Image (tube, rainbow, N blue to C red):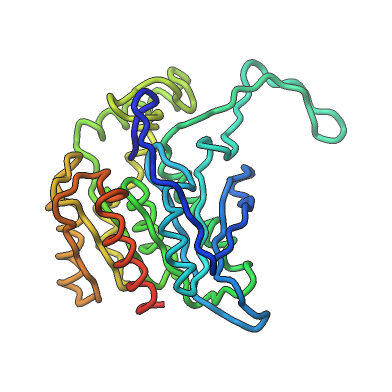
Amino acid sequence: MAGTDENPIIYPPIVVPDNVERKKVTVWSMGMALDADVYRPKGLTAEDKVPAVAMTHGMGGDKETPGRYACKLAAAGMIAISITHAGWGESQGRIIATGDLPDADANGEATIKARLIRETIDPVEWQESFRSAIDYLEGEPNVDPNRIGAWGTSFGGGTAISSAATDERVKALSVQVPAAFNWPEPMVALGKQRAIEIARGDFDAIPQSVDAVPGLKGTPHFARMIQQRVGDLVEQVSVPTLIMDAEKEELFDIRDSGGRFASLLDDKGVDKHYEIVPNIDHYGIYFDGFELSSDLATKWFTKHL
């Protein structure tokens, strides 16, 4: 989650340490080119194998949001990839045809009118994109495919949790101010109604600039949002997990999110650390809470990868 167009959050600049290199790459997911950065420790030899971490931003963010965290991981000897989800920042978005589709030529090609979808919040699509980021990491030189972690912030925390619950390649997890709960009933009811309307052609196939949430950048795709039940998926997580919440969280009740997640991990005997960062609100995790949250994440992945 992040600021609005009228009041964007300006994150501190990324300062790449001298022992880290950053390269801009393209991650392909569902036919779309996603903008991403790979952070690598300098001086690796061809034979070196090191841990790696896939990283995801939250609503309204992009690959720059995790960038400072990625620098610290790389400085500690890990390779990190930070992606921008489809339709945000410089990443491609979905293209949907408008009007009747013409017949294709002998090469299967046709000229159509189309609409480009931008800044839609689709957690199902985000999950696929994050999986593609892990796929990319597996093919990155020097990455040990048996030591891959997942990092997520805010709404992206739910994406990282979903990955840890369903992708056996993820061996450790770190989430901060995560949306780790199921959606409330009014939102579920709206999502079900939107799904019916979309299926019957009574609503945009991919909503854009509708169903806006005050103070939130982008358009939630409610028919797809309700398909992501992070509150259920947390029960499937069994890898070492670091959870960081904000003491003054204003967007949701941390007792129903990170707090519940931590308790479930305790019940299963999973190695976990739960930290409530004092004196910050949700977005404070990137400012006054940055040093603590980034240090904890770096130590966590160093220990468990």
How many marks overall?
A: 0
Note whether 238 is above or below 223 in the view shown: below
**Which of the 4 image quadrants contains residue 34?**
top right
Locate residue 255, reporting x and y percent.
12, 53
Query: Outermost residue, front direction?
Result: 18
Q: Residue at x 54, y 28 (%)?
A: 117
On the picture, is 82 further left or further right than 180? Answer: right
Rendered location of residue 2, percent (x, y) = 34, 37
Nearest the viewer among 34 and 199 is 34
Where does the image place residue 196, in percent across and percent down from the top left? 38, 27
Question: Is 56 placed above or below 17 here?
Answer: above
Residue at 43 percent across and 38 percent down: it is 122
Residue furthest to the right: 106
Q: In the displayed structure, does residue 101 sit left or right of residue 79?
A: right
For the C terminus, give its image quadrant.
bottom left
| Quadrant of the rendering where the N terminus is positioned | top left
- Coordinates of residue 242 in the picture (x, y in percent): 27, 66
Left or right for 43, reference 125: right
Q: What residue is rendered at 37% in x and 55% in y?
A: 152
What residue is drawn where x is 80% and y is 31%? Answer: 109
